[in-house]
Image (tube, rainbow, N blue to C red):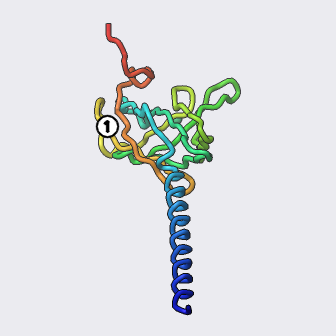
Amino acid sequence: MRKAFAFVSLLSFSCLGVAHNHQHDGHEHHHHATQDSANLQVSQAKIRAFLPAAKSTAGYMTVFNNSEKPITIVSAKIEGLGRVEIHEHIHSNGMMKMQPVKALVVPAKQRIEFKPGGHHLMGFDPKVKLKVGETRKLTLYFSDGEKVENEIKVVSLKDAFSSESHHHHH
Ligand SMILES: [Cu+2]
């Protein structure tokens, strides 16, 4: 009689243990699925090769936040460049000026297109000269410490302003 009782309680204890483990696993999976790095999609990333004597050059890309919460981009890095800033254009006294953006919020399920006259990347201080046609590593850093890595293509001045890759030559 006593033996049977002990056996039953052992069973129920192990069942609880299993249930707990399952819940824990579920939580862990959920956490991984909401990591920013997996949820910010970068596409069409390109940067113009430096013009002769130019101290800076501009880069463009499209970012899409595929998560349910905002993602804040706080900085960017491009392999071989000493410094990269995120800029935006603002109208000031009838003039277009650009200024650095300290934190760029990409709202949940929203897209931000970096393009001429809008948000853009600004590259400075090349350690290794950018050559048209090559790709470099682009890293975007988020306010929560996460980051996402992508490739950025080096393009000529002309190609930097055409958003379509299927450009026709005449
Ligand atoms: Cu700029």
Residue 92: name its quadrant. Answer: top right
Q: Dividing the image into 4 quarters, which one contains the C terminus? A: top left
Q: Residue 143: image x %, image y %?
A: 57, 54
In the figure, 146 relative to 48: above or below?
below
Q: Nearer the viewer, residue 7 or 113?
A: 7
128 relative to 140 in the view: left or right: left
Residue occupying the point 59% across, 38% down: 109
Residue occupying the point 30% across, 30% down: 132
Q: How many marks?
A: 1
In the figure, 141 relative to 90: above or below?
below
- The residue to which callout 1 is attached is 135
Residue occupying the point 64% across, 31% down: 90
Residue 35 visible? The answer is yes
Q: Nearer the viewer, residue 15 or 124?
A: 15
Q: Residue 166: image x %, image y %?
A: 36, 18
Residue lying farthest right?
Answer: 93
Q: Residue 33: image x %, image y %?
A: 50, 52
Q: Residues within 10 Å of mark 1 (few under 14, many from 20)?
A: some
Residue occupying the point 57% across, 29% down: 118
Residue lying farthest bottom?
Answer: 2
Q: Tell whether circle 1 marks a residue whose Cβ is less than 8 angstroms from ligand 1.
A: no
Q: Dividing the image into 4 quarters, which one contains the N terminus? A: bottom right
In the figure, 44 relative to 68: above or below?
above
1 relative to 133 in the view: left or right: right
Residue lying farthest top?
Answer: 170
Residue 145 visible? The answer is no
Judged from the image, the secondary structure of the residue bearing numbered disc 1 is strand
Q: Nearer the viewer, residue 112 or 58?
A: 112
User: Could you tell me the amino acid type at mark 1?
Assistant: Thr
166 relative to 31 in the view: left or right: left
